[in-house]
Structure formats: C-alpha cells, structure tokens
Image (tube, coloured by chain):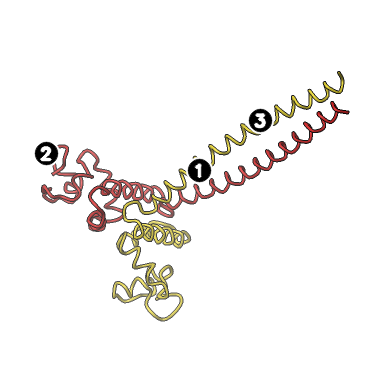
Chain colours: A red, B yellow
Amino acid sequence: MSNYTNSPCAACKFLRRKCTSDCVFAPYFPPEEPTKFANVHRIFGASNVSKILHEVAPHQREDAVNSLAYEAEARLNDPVYGCVGAISVLQRQVLRLQRELEETNADLMRYASCLGSETTSAYGGRRG
Amino acid sequence: MSNYTNSPCAACKFLRRKCTSDCVFAPYFPPEEPTKFANVHRIFGASNVSKILHEVAPHQREDAVNSLAYEAEARLNDPVYGCVGAISVLQRQVLRLQRELEETNADLMRYASCLGSETTSAYGGRRG
C-alpha cells in the first residue's frame, strides 16, 4: 500500500491490481502523482520498471524512479530525441563556453603582457 | 527484410518472427548489430519501440532509434541514473565553466582598468 494514504499506489491503480504491503512501486508512485507512473509505463512498461527497481539497492530506488520519470517525460515531449536532445544541447553549450573561456584567457594574457611592458616603460621613463 | 542482407533484421531474429518487407524495425536494426536491438528491447520493450517508430515521421526514425539505443545502453551501464547521469555531469560542467568565465572576465576588467591607470600614470609621469 502507498506510504501516504490508504489508497492503492498510482501504479496499482493504473494497472487495476491489488496494492499489497510489499508493492515495489508504492514508495515511489504515490496516488497523488498518477502522471509519474502513467509516463514511465508508457515509455518503459511496468515490468521493465519493476525489473530495474529490483536490480538496484533499496536506497537508490527513489533516484532510479526519478531518473526514469525524467527520461519518460522527455521522450513524451520529444519522441525523436527524448532526453538525448538535452545532452546534445548541453554538449554544445560546454563546447561554446570552453571556446569563450579560452578566448578570454588569451585576452587576459595579452593584457597581462601589455601591462608588464607598460609598467617597464613607465619605470624606464622615470629612470631615464 | 533487412536492407543489408537476406537475413531477418536483428529485431525479428531476436523476437523469432518472420521479417517481412514492411518490417518497421528492419531499416534501423540490421542483423550485423544484434546488441542494439537487444538493449532497446530490454529497457523499452519491442512494442514501445515500435509505437515510438510509428509516432515519428519516417525521416526521423533513424535518429529516434539511435537516441533510444543510446538511452538503453546508458541505463544498462547505470541502472540508477541512466543517461540522466550524463545530464547531471554536463549541467555541473556548464555551471563550473560559467563561473570560471565570469571570474576570468572580472580579471580582464581589472587588468583593463589597471592598464588604463598605468598608462595615465606613465603619461602623467612623463608630463610631470
């Protein structure tokens, strides 16, 4: 049964089955969030989600469910790329930032060497 | 049938079914790459993959299959986070690069203003 209420968890309600005290879904799919289960069911299927939950340690199951829910939502929003689309966007952003940082560092080096020669010339001027 | 040989495609071979000329999997799961289908089947299930392929336009199906294969492999390597793990790593990298770029830009501004005053002082020195 769900940890939160006496209702069956969102998974058992969706699958129209009895929610028992040892239900593997109940702790992660409360009845208040029916879409979370509907999404992972639509993309991965209930039995694959259950298989993954049984494969991971109990303390990691919440993270596993949340990452599956994230992936499922991304795939429903973008059936072609799913969350791999987000990876491509982030990879391009990293490359752009790395290039920008390299250019800014190069500018900084130019300023530093320029400042060095200006300082030398200033001191030189004072000495001469 | 597979586009590449007379063998059934990797999906039909895996599912032990006849590979017909209108097989939705055949163009994207050649018999030479059996793991690609085995992975997406294990994570998404054949019927969900077929559903997604029918949802997207034919010219986008190859991208869809490749992103599903990428997600499936990531989930098999990391059952807890799957490719959401890569998203977290990239998001942290973007934040780190943005911070570094801000700091470098601040350094650049300090150098620029310093160079401005050094130049003034050098000219001032020359004038005095």
- State the residue at coordinates (74%, 33%): A115
Please state which of residues B63 and A50 is positioned toward the viewer in this rendering: A50
The alpha-carbon separation of the residues under discs 2 and 1 comes to 44 Å
Given the image, what chain letter belongs to the residue carrying mark 1?
A: B
**Residue of label 2:** A6
Point out residue B36 in the picture as x, y percentages from the top left corner: 39, 67
**Residue of label 1:** B94
* Tally of numbered discs: 3
User: Tag 3, which secondary structure?
Assistant: helix
Amino acid identity at mark 2: Asn
User: Is residue B93 shown left or right of residue B54?
Assistant: right
Residue B106 lies in quadrant: top right
Earlier-in-chain disc, 3 versus 1: 1
**Residue of label 3:** B109
Residue A36 lies in quadrant: top left
Amino acid identity at mark 1: Val
Question: Please, which residue is most extreme toward the top here?
Answer: B128
Amino acid identity at mark 3: Met
